[in-house]
Image: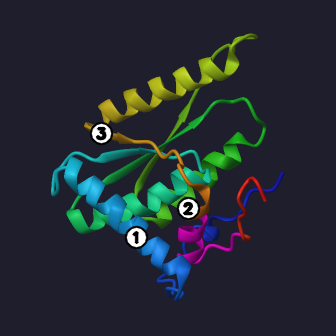
Amino acid sequence: SVLPPPRLLRRPAPPRRPGREAALAERLEARVGRALSARLQTHEDHPVALALSGGGDSVALLQLAADWARVNGRRLLCLTVDHGLNPDSPRWSEFARAAAEAAGAEWRGLVWRGEKPARGLPAAARLARHRLIADAAREARARVILFGHTADDLVEADWMRAEGATLGEMRDWSS
């Protein structure tokens, strides 16, 4: 399988497109910015950690959090876990690294080593991911970790297109 190139994430200073997509993107940016500002301190020495899988939810959060961090004098540290379960996982980690660096964030790759269970693999992988991310965040002196979980993929896709991504048009699952 071929991974999308990192340039999919954000081109330098993409022009805002008028209309629905731009309005949705601006509302989402404002909403996320307000939520981060309400919960996080500004101009602190310790970084804000962000779990970056390379999927749409974490990439959208990366862009939103990077913008907030830049404005509010915070470092952003992205943490990516390679579970070693897919032959393409090193390429996904490379994609995440490039995305983090393109957003102006620091990046660390983490690897789940050792034997993998024959049963309950998804739960074991999730537990390993959370442990690796928590340990790396503690080591970096981060006091918070952001995880992106999409509540509405249509809004996320609209925001990414408004930022210059070349995503195809998304449809509701019922369509």
- Closer to the chain start, of discs 2 and 1, is 1
Does the magenta segment cover residue 158? Answer: yes
* Disc 2: which residue: 156
On screen, residue 107 above or below 31? above
* Disc 3: which residue: 144
C-alpha gap between disc 2 and disc 3? 23 Å
SS assignment at label 1: helix
* Front-most of residues 8 and 25: 25
**Image spot of residue 140 (x, y percent):** 30, 38
**Outermost residue, front side:** 174
Answer yes or no: is residue 98 visible. yes
Does the magenta segment cover residue 163? Answer: yes
Answer yes or no: is residue 11 visible. no
On screen, residue 48 above or below 171? above
- Closer to the chain start, of discs 2 and 3, is 3
* Disc 1: which residue: 27
Question: What amino acid does circle 1 point to?
Answer: Arg
Question: What amino acid does circle 2 point to?
Answer: Glu
Q: Residue drawn at (69%, 65%), measured in percent from left and top? A: 5
Q: Are marks 2 and 1 in contact (CB under 8 Å)?
A: no
SS assignment at label 3: loop
C-alpha gap between disc 2 and disc 1? 11 Å
- Closer to the chain start, of discs 1 and 3, is 1
On screen, residue 7 above or below 141? below
Q: Residue drawn at (47%, 72%), measured in percent from left and top? A: 25
